[in-house]
Image (spheres, helix red, strand yellow):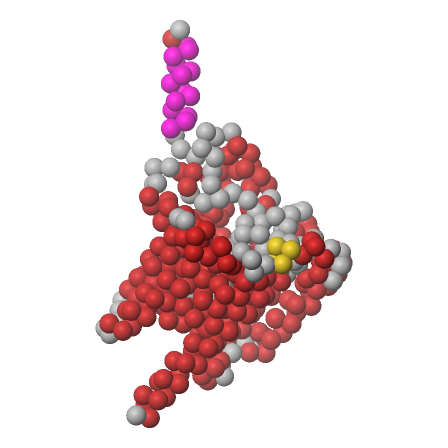
Amino acid sequence: MAGRHGADRRINKDEGSGMDPAISQYLLYVLVLSVVFGGAAQFTRFCLLGGMSAYMGERDGGRMAVYLGAIGVAIVVTTLVQWFAAIDLDQTRPPYRTADFAWGRYLIGGLLFGAGMVLARGCPVRSLVRTSQGSLQALVAIVVMAVAAYAMTRTSLFQTAFLPWVGALSVDLTAIGIPHQDLAALVGGGPLVYGLIAAALAALLLAVSWRWLPLGGNGLAWFGVLLLGTAVGLGFWVTGGAPGQAADMASMMQTMPQEGLGTQSFTFSAPLGDVVYFLQNVDNTSTITFGVVAVVGVFLGSLVSALVRRDVQFAAPRAIGEWLRTVIGAAMVGVGAVLAMGCTVGHGLTGLSTLALGSMLSIASIMLGAWITLRIQRRRADAGCAG
């Protein structure tokens, strides 16, 4: 009887002791990659908006080169991971290669995200980096983005306000004999065609980046590009390979399965909403998803980099109008990111690394929305100066 009671006490202790070791190891891998990503994003000043703004204003392509180069590296590493680790990228979170080509979501969500990104002074990743550097404006933007993403993913907002009309703006590719939306499948090619397309696209992006950002004098920037792209590719290995499979098996044995498992890599749309949900359930470790760890890790990595480089300076806008633009823009980013199923990282790096057509349309829409908004802002500034 005493032995039975001792066994019962051990079982209860194990149940309340926290996370399964396999899941803990999985999340530790995610944390390491996220810290690396955040540090690299900080010291390279990784930002699509910053790159577009610099090129439109001074024809300086340096920051744009970092963004495009990271995509090129991500394509190479993700393709290698897919082949040599046998990772199935046709089943990801979110489903980048789905046969349901939701062009309405990609287009409308991307435009909304791009315009909001300009008003908020950055995308989610850039806002996390700026927060680590002491920007109160970026902190407010992150909070608003997270609340908006939470409303879109954890409440009935999307189902009631968006799904009834945006759900019809979609094409089922299987109806025309296309199993999924990666570029090779669209042209009816197999693994060889996929590899050739991936190599050609990566080479083009890296060549453009090299022209705008020569290696001489820019070694640190290129090191950051390598880290950013590699982190995305290894994210797929962690989640779809042995660590992710072990975590999934452990999760199935738990009373409360771990949320957010599945093959995936970095994106910061729905994950910001996951952070809000986790903060409401901090005593439930099953709510610690890939996205929650990624958000925390990127912030920590950026903070370490900023402290090492002495790049921390507390600042906040003084004008009420600037605060209002930040809140409105951040809300647009949060809603647009979930609507488009990705952001400048989720589609721009992770989605494009799978050669998904939807990610290409999304990132083009984001850039178009940002370009239009930047042009409007510049014209208003010019008119103000002329007046």
* Vertical relation: 358 (above or below) 3: below
Q: Position of residue 236 (x, y in %)?
A: 57, 50
Q: Position of residue 274 (x, y in %)?
A: 41, 48
Q: Quadrant of the C terminus?
A: bottom left
* Vertical relation: 373 (above or below) 263: below
**What secondary structure do most residues of the magenta stretch adopt?**
helix
Q: Position of residue 375 (x, y in %)?
A: 44, 81
Q: In percent of the image, x 64 and y 50: which residue is there?
A: 90
Residue 349 in view (yes/no): no
Residue sitting nearer the eye, 327 or 88: 327
Task: Identify the magenta region.
Answer: 3-16
Question: Which quarter of the figure has residue 78?
Answer: bottom right
Q: In percent of the image, x 61 and y 48: which residue is there?
A: 91
Number of numbered discs present? 0
Q: Given the current orientation, which residue lies at the most extreme bottom position?
A: 386
Residue sitting nearer the eye, 204 or 387: 387
Q: Is residue 18 magenta?
A: no
* Vertical relation: 119 (above or below) 303: below
Q: Quadrant of the N terminus?
A: top left
Is residue 293 shown left or right of residue 212? left
Q: Position of residue 287 (x, y in %)?
A: 41, 41
Residue sitting nearer the eye, 171 or 327: 171
